[in-house]
Image: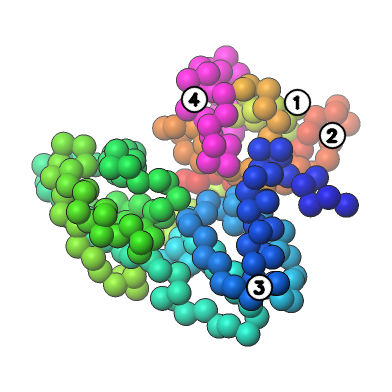
Amino acid sequence: MSVYQHYRPEERPFIDQVLQWQEDVEVRHQIRLTDFLDPRQQKIIESVIGANDDVSLSFSGGHPLAERRRGLLTPPYITPAEDDFQLTLFSIEYPAKFVTLEHRDVLGALMNIGLKREKFGDIYLNEAAIQLVVTSEVANYVQANLATIGKANVKLKEIPVAEHTKPVEAWEEAAATVSSLRLDVVLAQFYRLSRTKVLPYIDKGLVKVNWKVVDQPAFPVEEGDYISVRGFGRVQLKAIEGRTKKDKIRIRYERLL
């Protein structure tokens, strides 16, 4: 049985990478630390590695509730410490009384200085400052180059990772029936929109499935997928629970409040 049959074709390169990491640890007794992974990638690693007695797998994103986390693969005789994840946490100060910043402003500023998305984790904004966790290897670069976000001048201050204050997220669970698992169909259900209103969001590249832009209305959604529409929040398709007598598909999903 091929390991690839449980995943989408576009996920195969990442699976190949996971298999290489597994071999490095299992055969060569090396330690492998990944960049920041989204929840889908974390699940793939957990599934591929499975209950391998020769490889230990752990994650950290600087906070117990972190969404984006680095993975650490080690031989079983090594007990990882938090420092092994090589995380650096910044508090980004800005004139909050005069400027309003959003998550996308911070994300855009980081991308504009040439930082790859896998080099930084969760971004948390509060009323006075922004918290940002990055891989330690790029920390000096970020501190030296991130001077503005939007129209605001900012100042980065390194703080202990233990001071990461990501808030608790609230998810609301719901059940429904849909005629198919096409992306446009499930989006209409998730966000209480008509399929006609959903299509422009897909066409404009504003819809992501598992953190990747998908612009095909007929894209097949699968159990466990995370889906987001810019401005509407995120939903996870938790389970596909069979069909009704009228051949509708029963689904259960969670929406981030």
Residue 176 seen in the current view: no
Determine the CA span between mark 3 and mark 4: 42 Å
Given residues 132 and 54, the one toward you in this image is: 54
In the rendered image, residue 176, in percent from the top left (x then y), is placed at 69, 36
Q: Which residue is mark 3?
A: 28
Label 1: which secondary element: loop
Residue type at the position of mark 3? Arg
Question: Counting other residues with Cα less than 10 Å from the Cα at mark 4, is it few (<14), some (14-19), or many (20 or more)?
Answer: some
Q: Nearer the viewer, mark 2 or mark 3?
A: 3
Looking at the rendered structure, the secondary structure element under dot 2 is loop
- Is 75 drawn above or below residue 102 in the view shown? below
> Where does label 1 land, which residue?
179
The amino acid type found where label 2 is placed reads Thr
Q: Nearer the viewer, mark 3 or mark 4?
A: 3
Mark 4 and mark 1 in contact (Cβ < 8 Å)? no
Over which residues does the magenta segment extend?
Answer: 188-215
* Amino acid type of the residue tagged 4 in the rendering: Gly
- In the picture, measured across the screen, residue 205 lies left or right of residue 89, that is right
Q: Residues within 10 Å of mark 3 (few under 14, many from 20)?
A: few
- Report the Cα–Cα distance between label 4 and label 2: 33 Å
Lower position in the chain sequence, tag 3 or tag 4: 3
10 Å neighbourhood of mark 2: few (<14), some, or many (≥20)? Answer: few
Left/right of residue 159 with respect to residue 236 in the rendered view: left
Task: Identify the image quadrant of residue 48.
Answer: bottom right
Which of the marked residues, 1 or 4, is nearer the chain's N terminus? 1
Question: Which residue does the image show at 30% across and 60% down from the upper left?
Answer: 139
In space, the residues marked 2 and 1 are separated at their CA atoms by 10 Å
Mark 1 belongs to which amino acid?
Answer: Ser
